[in-house]
Amino acid sequence: MKGNVVKIITALSIFSSGLWIAGLGLTIKDQFFYESEAPIKEISLKDVVAKQEDGIHIIALGDSLTRGTGDESGKGYVGYVVDELQTKTKQSIHVKNLAIKGQRSAGLASQLQQVEVQRQIKQADIILMTIGGNDLFQSGEALSNFSLERINQAKADYLQNLHTIFKTIRSLNPNAVVFYISLYNPFNDLKDAKTTSAVVREWNFDSAEVASNYPSIIAVPTFDLFELNVNDYLYSDKFHPNKEGYKLIGERVASLITFTEEDEKND
């Protein structure tokens, strides 16, 4: 984007770690919860690999959450991100959604080896991504036949794949900002809610730790968005978000992307 300076604000001061862990037995490190005292970190997209003159290029990767399954409007969180960004800039926004329903981390790592996918990533200014929900929940099998040992093995495999995914993206495009959208707990209203919430939060923490090893990869929490009123934001399958759930996610991601006055002058 010639003349554009897109700043990414990663300090999420609205989160309170006390709200997330109240009454739960798992101890989570303080840095996972984006303390309000943390300094604001800004990432500029002005030096993206392919300096586009035709607007902002967004590539979406991952699973059914990025496809928008459960949103009757068809937008999904990707569509709501675009809606919000269009209120902030006059630049045209181009989106390519490469997500695959049911995809797990191993599948995404393999998809990133495809020539056309690599070409798209090289052109991206912003990359949106969800992955890991199918690795963890395994179509519900992980809960119906709960085994902490099996979940820990699945997480170990997933984290290794996540390293591969981030490393591949960074090798193809060192400068595009990647928003990795972490997991919520769709089973919060079930009898084992405390157990599943603890598992999801630890999964998210470990995923964020992997993301922290790579520049310009932002782990975006969604756990708190669904925790208190989960059924209000789930589709009829009680797993995917509904329209309102996706809108919450999209608004959160978009809130991290701001445009300077200089950008608007150059539009």
Image (tube, rainbow, N blue to C red):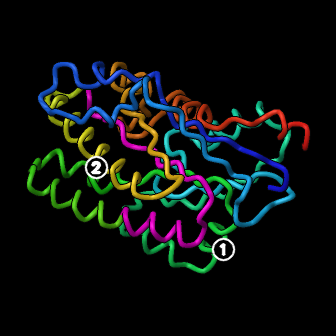
Give the quarter of the figure containing the N terminus.
Answer: bottom right
**Residue toward you, 195 or 231:** 195
Give the quarter of the figure containing the C terminus.
Answer: top right
Percent coordinates x, y for residue 251 in the rendering: 59, 31
Percent coordinates x, y for residue 248 in the rendering: 53, 29
The image shows residue 122, relative to residue 38, as above or below, that is below
Q: What's under tag 2, amino acid-wise?
A: Asp
Q: Is residue 174 magenta?
A: yes
Disc on the earlier residue, 1 or 2:
1
Label 2 crowd bin: few (<14), some (14–19), many (20+), radius 10 Å:
some
Q: Is residue 133 visible?
A: no
- Which of the numbered marks, if any, corresponds to residue 119? 1
- Snapshot quadrant of residue 19: top left
Q: Secondary structure at mark 2?
A: helix
- Residue placed at 52% from the left, 66% from the top? 169
- Snapshot quadrant of residue 34: top left
The image shows residue 188, relative to residue 118, as above or below, that is above
Q: Is residue 93 left or right of residue 193?
A: right
**Residue toward you, 258 or 59:** 258
Percent coordinates x, y for residue 244 in the rendering: 53, 27
- Residue placed at 64% from the left, 38% from the top? 257
Q: Which residue is mark 2?
A: 206
Percent coordinates x, y for residue 45 in the rendering: 69, 52
Q: Is residue 150 visible?
A: yes
Label 1 crowd bin: few (<14), some (14–19), many (20+), radius 10 Å:
few
- Residue placed at 27% from the left, 46% from the top? 203
* Residues drawn in magenta: 162-188
Q: Secondary structure at mark 1?
A: helix
Q: What's under tag 1, amino acid-wise?
A: Arg
Q: Is residue 36 magenta?
A: no
